[in-house]
Image (cartoon, coloured by chain):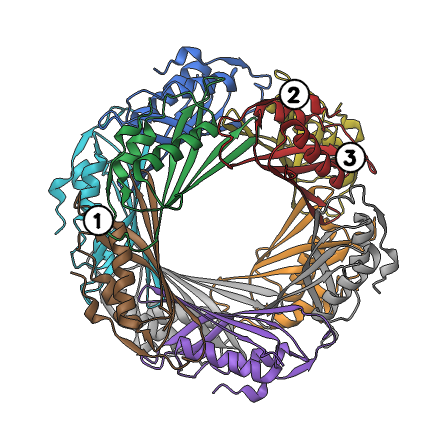
Chain colours: A green, B red, C yellow, E blue, F orange, G brown, H purple, I cyan
Amino acid sequence: MSDASILETFENAHPNRDYVIEHTFPEFTSVCPKTGQPDFGTIVITYVPDRKCVELKSLKFYLNGFRNTGIFYEAVTNQLLEDLVAATAPRRMTVVTKWGPRGGLSSVVTASYEQPVA
Amino acid sequence: MSDASILETFENAHPNRDYVIEHTFPEFTSVCPKTGQPDFGTIVITYVPDRKCVELKSLKFYLNGFRNTGIFYEAVTNQLLEDLVAATAPRRMTVVTKWGPRGGLSSVVTASYEQPVA
Amino acid sequence: MSDASILETFENAHPNRDYVIEHTFPEFTSVCPKTGQPDFGTIVITYVPDRKCVELKSLKFYLNGFRNTGIFYEAVTNQLLEDLVAATAPRRMTVVTKWGPRGGLSSVVTASYEQPVA
Amino acid sequence: MSDASILETFENAHPNRDYVIEHTFPEFTSVCPKTGQPDFGTIVITYVPDRKCVELKSLKFYLNGFRNTGIFYEAVTNQLLEDLVAATAPRRMTVVTKWGPRGGLSSVVTASYEQPVA
Amino acid sequence: MSDASILETFENAHPNRDYVIEHTFPEFTSVCPKTGQPDFGTIVITYVPDRKCVELKSLKFYLNGFRNTGIFYEAVTNQLLEDLVAATAPRRMTVVTKWGPRGGLSSVVTASYEQPVA
Amino acid sequence: MSDASILETFENAHPNRDYVIEHTFPEFTSVCPKTGQPDFGTIVITYVPDRKCVELKSLKFYLNGFRNTGIFYEAVTNQLLEDLVAATAPRRMTVVTKWGPRGGLSSVVTASYEQPVA
Amino acid sequence: MSDASILETFENAHPNRDYVIEHTFPEFTSVCPKTGQPDFGTIVITYVPDRKCVELKSLKFYLNGFRNTGIFYEAVTNQLLEDLVAATAPRRMTVVTKWGPRGGLSSVVTASYEQPVA
Amino acid sequence: MSDASILETFENAHPNRDYVIEHTFPEFTSVCPKTGQPDFGTIVITYVPDRKCVELKSLKFYLNGFRNTGIFYEAVTNQLLEDLVAATAPRRMTVVTKWGPRGGLSSVVTASYEQPVA
Amino acid sequence: MSDASILETFENAHPNRDYVIEHTFPEFTSVCPKTGQPDFGTIVITYVPDRKCVELKSLKFYLNGFRNTGIFYEAVTNQLLEDLVAATAPRRMTVVTKWGPRGGLSSVVTASYEQPVA
Amino acid sequence: MSDASILETFENAHPNRDYVIEHTFPEFTSVCPKTGQPDFGTIVITYVPDRKCVELKSLKFYLNGFRNTGIFYEAVTNQLLEDLVAATAPRRMTVVTKWGPRGGLSSVVTASYEQPVA
């Protein structure tokens, strides 16, 4: 079961500058809730940190937590975005999920977040 | 014969956020109405859902429904866009059809839809 | 329905020399006899002609004849080899069929023929 | 000799929508007027149709008509654009010609047309 | 838990000819028995059938059965070969497993079987 | 009209050693004798010279000589081999011709020559 | 230990024009401060020079100076930017660092600087 | 020694239209003024002609003229731009020079010119 | 300093069958003994195990041990082969080292071992 | 002028084992003796050393020595082989030279040497 509470962060040492961090994870797998068959995807997370950066090892464990979770493409994408925004409160973040062919159809889902103006 | 009524949808669980879904289908085939010979293409459907997302298995059956339909490139592209807009009422949608060489000429047709402002 | 009788040949003008002809057809489609769903493949035919070469336009029509035929990968491959050997009586021939992913599995089937020593 | 009068068109069935048609022809050849040696290029024609679309077979014959014409890269590009604009009266059109190396130099020429506002 | 008994076969309709069948599965995953972390690989199975061919859907379910199995690369490769040889009694078979990087090291393991001469 | 007499040669300065020369020409064009439409191909000539090497500029003019010749793929390949063997009397020579898609079918023809043992 | 003082510059001979210089270094290595294991990356530095350009040999030695330094991806990126801005006072500069997979996750970090308006 | 006076031009036959000409030369070589060792690069020249186009053969000879000239990357790029602007008085021009690795560092320099408003 | 004693092995569970294990390590670095500058390479180790397989984590630490060792390409290749043969006593082993460009020259060194017949 | 006497060697530390060294040099240039125009090629030297290995820096200088030498493709290839065999007395050596397109024709020349049996 995926668990956002295992996401760890470290303090951004350069909060005075907008800079971009991108992590790509080609080994994501979850389970189709309709057929029970596994899905395989590549996850790309891009963000501008504010006060916190996501720690890589905890990110990997968090992503691996979906391994036996039944969840649709659209839901994975939005949940990753929401969990990572909750954990890091970034200035901007985009999550892209790219899925291998099912019945000949390959899919990509993209969701973004922007920090509201204070 | 292609049949838009077999397109199924499911409710978009994240209507508060504009996000993008892209489906690529490299196994599209129809028939040239002029020569009776088969055409082969790749279809790319990209959309921002509003209330409804298109269900993948029904999309595949819908696309396979063109297999023995005589139809020109431009007509396929516009019909796919119209059928999918009718079925899902998206905020935005683009359909791209990419066709293998005929007489040395390869073709790409691109049509887009934007939801009218309410 | 596929029909080998439409295969036409022309006389090999260089029968004194073993040389190799290869035809690649990336637009093959047939139907899975189990699921009724379409299969898509690339066909590669390689042969050393003896007295006859296969005529390209008739080869294309012959291959297009499988469009609505329910047939397994292994059967297509062996039938193509047998029909083309029957039509051209080559010195050697190999048929390779390469199939797009189904359930994540991509397949390639390869069958060969060698003219018996007289 | 190239001959624009052989270009045929068919009526655009979707004039209410701006959509894009792109044709790529990797088998263009003409003759260098200076050296008499053949030139080889790829032609990419992209346009938004208004009332008329260019018919593919006639486009191919039109392009093949340059085979023994002595003409410079810049002139080919502008003539293709002018002939195709004259034949189809599009809303927008771009012609790109990409030429193989001559004396180590490869060239690309790009010309565009936009329909004047009525 | 992986289970070879779910492998189904169908009769080889062309036993008089040696021909080659290759299946590629880029979505294999198992678990490292040492670290408990998931491994991801591509499996390539190549064989010359004798009396039996492996049925594709059952092959997919069999391969998916390793999803939560703790097993080393070398063991997976040899077990796949032994299970598939037991199920199909082929004339020849090769199993290749290709694994994504761990600690910077990518691995490929290849094992083969040849039917003993009767 | 193609004309083998324009092929020039120069003396091989290293006849004591078997070495290999390969020339690739991606700009070959001839005419289909059946349809009158142009064909486009890449020619690869590989040989071990004996006493003579083919001069490059004359080879280019010779190949360009096929521009308006009506000739089938198999005939081009065998004629190139025969003309070049006649001109250079090589120890070994192979001619490969690779042709762009016609009706979806791409073709490659390969013919070889070996100097008879004296 | 990395040492910005070894960075040398030469005078920009074309200060009247904004132009762009990009240097790519695929052989960067530092040490993960958490695990003590080496990290490997590609560095891309892009800038518009003002009065000074960075000298290439000194840049290489400066980058090699990180070889045994324990430092996180985000810190490397920001330190490279700050050291190079300090050394060259450019009109604009961007530093991109691209890192090989660790635990399946590949990372890219991008930081930019713009000269304040005088 | 490079010599801009050998650049020839011909009259632009389509001055009423802004169109783009791009020439790519992968065979540029000059000499590093510091080490005396040869540098190798690819030059990309892109421009919108006004009254004059650069003639290709003279462009090649001009570029070959740098073969034994000692000159830095930044200087080559700016000199090419200045010489070609002087020769052709274009509406816009960009020169990109891409250099092979030296000490592990690959470089790209880009300079542009825009015709002043009359 | 590199240290072969840290190489660990585990028992080959399938000694009755010759099978092939290949490990690729794109993150190898050592130091040029002549210039003191770092070298970067990719290591490919391929072997048929007899009684022992090399353990991956220890292999990684062993390879990382060359980080600050001054050693030539040829010496690295032969030492890796000798250390790994000593550690695993394989039936056959090949070590390939591929090195990035130095002064424009890229190098590959390949050394092999075969178990003497008992 | 090229000068084989500048080739330096170092002693092969592993003469008891046949192993293979390959050097690739993509920055070779010489001059066409017929036209005076520069030629550009990639050189690949592969050898099994006996007592001596070629030193890389001297190899680079030796190859750069052809920069202003007028010499044909076939002659370069055979001379490189002869000079390097003379300098290193290898067990086996192959020199491959790959040349960019001239008049549309690209060329590859391959020459080999094998040490006579003592």
Q: Picture coordinates of residue F51 (x, y %)?
A: 57, 69
Q: Chain of mark 1?
A: G
Q: CA distance from mark 3 to mark 2?
A: 26 Å
Labelled disc at residue B71: 3
Q: Amino acid at mark 2?
A: Ile
Mark 1 or 2: the one toward you? 1
| Residue I19 appearing in the image | no
Secondary structure of the residue carrying tag 1 is: strand
Residue ID at (27%, 61%): G80
* Residue G59 drawn at (x, y percent): 28, 68
On the image, which quarter does residue H48 sit in?
A: bottom right
Q: Is residue I44 above or below residue E30?
A: below
Considering every residue shown, the one lying at the far front of the view is A118
Depth check, mark 3 against mark 2: the one in front is 3
The chain that hosts pointer 2 is C
The numbered disc on residue G38 is: 1
In terms of secondary structure, where does tag 3 sit?
loop
Residue at left offset 20%, top offset 71% = G6
Mark 2 lies on a secondary structure that is loop
Respond whether the residues carrying marks 3 and 2 are from the same subunit. no
- Foreground label between 1 and 3: 3
Image-based side of I14 in relation to H98, left or right: left
G81 relative position to I87: left or right: right
